[in-house]
């Protein structure tokens, strides 16, 4: 995976989840009692990995969340936001240890959270990457594999495997 902070973005005609979420960018069994705590916890990990202050990431995600919940249904949330300092999109996948209320559109609790961070000036790319990742998470096979994963590597494989 390319470095999302210092290397220029790559243009791909066929986007894949593996282009944005590497094996180190998964969290299995994240224990968080609320949407805000999930976002804060992932922002800390992302900030450490990217060299960006976690509060910058957290605040960007919470700003987006204030516009409307990113809980898309079927127990899935896809918080996403542009973040200053990034040159290419990057994401984190978390499976929660216990489902939480996320104000999802179907009213169901969320146990799968995929955070997408994109360059601040790349709105078209933001939409395209978001669509790519949302398509993966619409698949019941993918969701079942994510929920059955017993290790971080299985969790990553469940998302990126092109079955």
Image (cartoon, grey):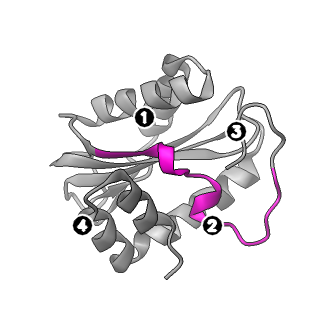
Image position of 161 (left or right of 75):
right
Comparing 57 with 127, the one in front is 57
From the viewer's side, name the closer residue of 13 and 60. Answer: 13
The local crowd at label 4, few if under 14, some if 14 to 19, many if 20 or more residues have their Cα within 10 Å, is: few
Report helix, strand or loop for mark 3: loop
Q: Is residue 14 above or below residue 79?
A: below
Mark 3 or mark 1, which is nearer to you?
3
Calculate the distance from the C-alpha at mark 3 to the C-alpha at mark 1: 26 Å
Q: Residue at x 21, y 57 (%)?
A: 107
In the rendered view, would you say 60 is above or below 80?
Answer: above
Vertical side of 92 occupied by 12: above or below: below
Give the x, y percent position of residue 24: 49, 44
Between discs 3 and 1, the one toward the N terminus: 3
Q: Which residue is tagged 2? A: 16
What residue occupies the far bottom of the structure in this picture?
163
For residue 79, which quarter of the picture?
Answer: top left
- Magenta includes 12? yes
Q: Nearer the viewer's eye, disc 2 or disc 1?
A: 2
The residue tagged 3 is 4
Q: Which residue is mark 4?
A: 148
Q: Are marks 2 and 1 in contact (CB under 8 Å)?
A: no
Across and down, in percent, residue 4 comes to: 70, 38
Q: Which residues are magenta?
A: 10-28
Disc 1 target residue: 66
The one of 53 and 100 positioned closer to us in this rendering: 53
């Amino acid at each position: 995976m390319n470095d999302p902070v210092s290397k220029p973005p790559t243009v791909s005609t066929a986007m894949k989840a593996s282009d944005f979420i590497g094996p180190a960018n998964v969290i299995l069994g994240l224990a968080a009692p609320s949407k805000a705590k999930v976002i804060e916890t992932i922002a800390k990990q992302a900030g450490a990995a990217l060299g960006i202050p976690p509060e910058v990431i957290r605040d960007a995600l919470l700003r987006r969340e204030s516009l409307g919940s990113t809980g898309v249904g079927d127990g899935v949330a896809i918080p996403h936001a542009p973040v200053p300092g990034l040159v290419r999109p990057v994401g984190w996948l978390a499976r929660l240890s216990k489902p939480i209320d996320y104000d999802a559109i179907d009213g169901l609790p969320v146990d799968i959270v995929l955070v997408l961070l994109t360059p601040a000036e790349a709105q078209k790319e933001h939409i395209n990457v978001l669509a790519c990742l949302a398509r993966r998470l619409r698949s019941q096979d993918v969701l079942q594999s994510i929920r059955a994963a017993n290790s971080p590597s299985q969790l990553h494989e469940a998302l990126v495997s092109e079955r």
